Image (spheres, helix red, strand yellow):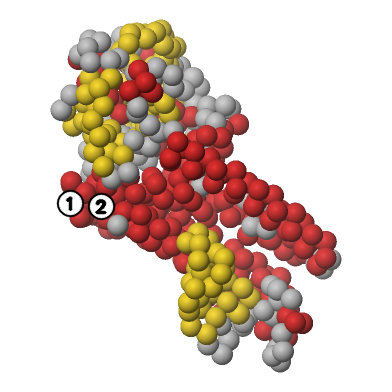
Amino acid sequence: MNIVLAILALSIMIIVHEFGHFIVAKANGVRVKEFSIGLGPRLCGIRTKETDYCLKLLPFGGACVMQGDVDDETSDEKLDETRSFENKSVWARISIIAAGPIFNFLLAFVFAVIIIGRLGYSPAKVYSVEEDSIAYEAGIREGDVITKINGRTISFDTEYSTYRLVYPEKTMNITYVRDGKKYKTTLVPNKVTKTAYRVGITIQGEPVTIAEVSDGPAKDAGIKVNDVIKKINGKEVKNTSDVGTFMSEKEGAECTFTLLRDGNTVEVKVTPILTEYEEVETGMVVYSPYVKGNAWTTLKYSASQVRYSIATVFDSFHMLFAGQVTSKDIAGPVGIVNVISNTVESSKEDGTLYVILNLLYLIVLLSANLGVMNLLPIPALDGGRLVFLLIEAVRGKPIAREKEGMVHFVGMALLMVLMVIIMFNDIRNVFFS
């Protein structure tokens, strides 16, 4: 059932993306020959006079095939050339191509409205500040709300945490609000050497999920990537900080991890070892319970959630190029389905409502991600096609169709190679890590 929900979530994003192309194409008088969900051989569908609406074998991807997208000369039917994509104005074609990613952003916004309308939002509020710490000396106090770091808008506590993860040592020019007034300060994070009991895992997110397992006690005990930590020594793990806290309480004694793995509960006994490590600290904790607002704040923070989701894509690229993450951390369709499935399973004990809300949150993040990725200027993707159309708008005439087709063909071939590599990576992480 979890896998079905995960595939359904992916399908919703794909359907909305292709529907964006479809509805704007129709509005511009372009004939849509095929509207398909999935890839590969056709399984079933409905053929109308103009369009074949169909479901295909592989539940990843989709297509909105317009007249002019493929070779129409092989068709026996008489075609109205005025309804071909290629015969529409350049701005009409730009709107059709851009509609897919834009609809993904709209989907993310609509679902964000549902989530924030029901739960509220968590501002980047300073929960605590250690005395004599860097943050305290910079003038920051408990209850302050951080609104900007180095000119970047910060709307949520998770947004602050993401920034610190991506730029741990970067000097922060912080704008914060106290009693309705804005203040500015500069904070330089401090690198310190600490010791703590650790087992050799990297964790992330809520629910707390194993992102990486290095050589050490956890690997020896059989803990795997994508395991969800539910309890340590019988205590419920609600966030990433709980993991270190609960292990430290045992002072090196054996700990019992209760894990969720592929829908099953697994108990693993691990003995942490005292480890010396470096940490870049500020001396403050940024966290806030959910705050519910009025209709305006709901819309405002829903837009901020989409903006934050888009920003995380570029943050991920930064971490990849900076060596903070590796290719092993990249997930494709199989990996995404597995993450969604684990999230659904770990939310069940909180009730159906939280299963739905967590699923919607993942769709917000992934739909915004899909929108951004499709707008990148990569041949064969929407962004690559937009580049050629924008060049045509500037030049006043199109680039030769054969040349553009060759570029997209090479891009598609490279994308297929990349997809095979990512699929292999997914299978390795899900089944063999």
Do the CB atoms of the residues marked 2 and 1 lie less than 8 Å apart? yes
State whether residue 131 appears in this view.
Answer: yes
List x then y, in percent, for residue 176.
Answer: 36, 31
The residue identified by callout 2 is 355
Q: Residue at x 50, y 59 (%)?
A: 60
Is residue 312 shown above or below 23?
A: above
Q: Residue 351, which numbered label?
A: 1
Q: Secondary structure at mark 1?
A: loop
Is residue 324 shown above or below 295?
A: above
List x then y, in percent, for residue 378.
Answer: 67, 51
Q: Is residue 398 left or right of residue 221?
A: right
List x then y, in percent, for residue 316.
Answer: 52, 37
- Three-letter residue code for mark 2: Val
Q: Is residue 330 left or right of residue 200?
A: right
Q: Residue at x 52, y 30 (%)?
A: 325
- Three-letter residue code for mark 1: Gly
Is residue 138 shown above or below 397?
A: above
Q: Residue at x 52, y 27 (%)?
A: 324
List x then y, in percent, for residue 424.
Answer: 55, 43
